[in-house]
Amino acid sequence: MHARAPGALAAAAAVAGLLACASTEPGATATEGSGTAGSGTAGSGTTAGTGAGVGTGMSEGSGGSGGTNGSGDDLGAAGGCEITTPEALMACVDLDRYVDDLTFIAAPRTPGSPHWLAVQERCASALEEAGLVVELEGYGSGTNVIGVLPGVGAEADEVVLLGAHYDHIAACDGADDNASGVAGALEVARVLAAAPLRRTLVVACWDQEELGLVGSRAYAQALVDPSAVVVAFNFDMIGYADPAPNTQTFPGPLAARFPGLAAELDAHEHRADFIAVVADDLAEGVALDLEARAEGLGRLTGVMTLSAAEKLDEDAFGLLAQSDHRSFWERDVPALHVFDTGVFRNPAYHCFGGADTVDTLDHAFTFDVLRATVGAVAAAAALDG
């Protein structure tokens, strides 16, 4: 475990108006400093790329240009990237760092297991090394890892949050679910930690999502002032894509609710290579900004916006509220879920139809997810350029 200076996160959270009294594990304290994590390596020089944009955006009621994915260009952070604008920050994403974290995380990690603890430590170390103030937040049955980057402007009491769950089920590597999301959140944190954000940034590794959103719900329910959270982003399964026709499913009830998306998917020959975003109506503007940035990279993106009445309707739209963004919807916090559509695309979901391993993932797809999210989070956090 990391040794941490008492109260560091509590001080940062107090500035942001986030928590009443965050509970911590016995013996766990907070600090801003370095730590250690288990080692994990991945090959460098991953290659792929994006093709020219084609088609139209997939969000209901919005335009924008679509795109298809190509191959052949080196992926990774551009040399000499700048931090003056959200667009410039998008060029700072380093795919090799993401793949390194992904490769380390992707192994069975049920809560309480040795690798669960190692991944918890990896989250804490990465966030600390990026410059965030980190706390291991115990809530009784599990432990969230919370990193805070205080804002530098008058809006520092307002918060933009990005989270991803780090637990998984037994006997499954969980590369897509959700090593991809955790590794992605850590890379977004590294990029944004160097930027002058006027709002406070919180990056979280949630525990026990697979047991019913337990960790994120504990955090959300402890918010003193939910209105302080401008928007919450959720990463859960951002690694799988397949450009072959007829690899994407879209259930009939969803097609009926989002006919525009269904038509776009038909035109796209049901290829499973677009980014999906689910948002409530309060977060729709942020979701559309992310969509525009992704499609500017040539990556087709679809936004599904749910009304206040729809977002917690288990019978009608429960399939779109099965991850940690729901915990924030329950507190009326604007939230969006960025994902690869999960079970509607990946046959290895929970290892039911195969092994959910790193070699099955499409890093070019995730590269676009991360770049678009960096831009959208930077804009939401009021980058002071």
Image: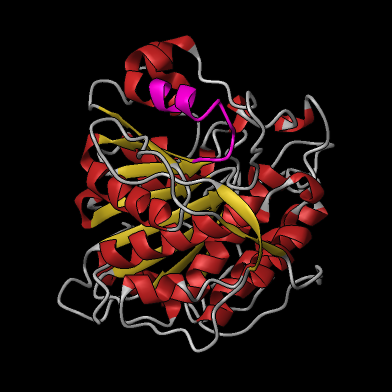
In the rendered image, which quarter contains the N terminus?
A: bottom right
Q: Quadrant of residue 96?
A: bottom right
Q: Is residue 131 visible to the viewer in this orientation of the structure?
A: yes
Q: Position of residue 264 (x, y in %)?
A: 41, 27
Asked whether, in this view, residue 29 is left or right of residue 38, the answer is left
Residue 55 higher or lower than 166, as above or below = above
Q: Position of residue 100 (x, y in %)?
A: 73, 67
At horizontal 47% and vertical 63% (from top left) the residue drawn is 371
At horizontal 59% and vertical 26% (from top left) the residue drawn is 248
* Residues shaded magenta: 262-274
Farthest residue toward the bottom? Answer: 80
Q: Is residue 223 visible to the viewer in this orientation of the structure?
A: no
Q: Position of residue 343 (x, y in %)?
A: 62, 27
Q: Name the foreground residue: 47 vs 317.
A: 47
At horizontal 73% and vertical 66% (from top left) the residue drawn is 46
Q: Name the foreground residue: 163 vs 240.
A: 240
Q: Is residue 210 magenta?
A: no
Residue 33 higher or lower than 206, as above or below = below
Q: Name the foreground residue: 23 vs 167.
A: 167
Asked whether, in this view, residue 24 is left or right of residue 90, the answer is right
At horizontal 32% and vertical 26% (from top left) the residue drawn is 311
Q: Position of residue 169 (x, y in %)?
A: 74, 36
Colouring used for the render? secondary structure
Residue 214 higher or lower than 98, as above or below = above
Residue 269 higher or lower than 31, as above or below = above
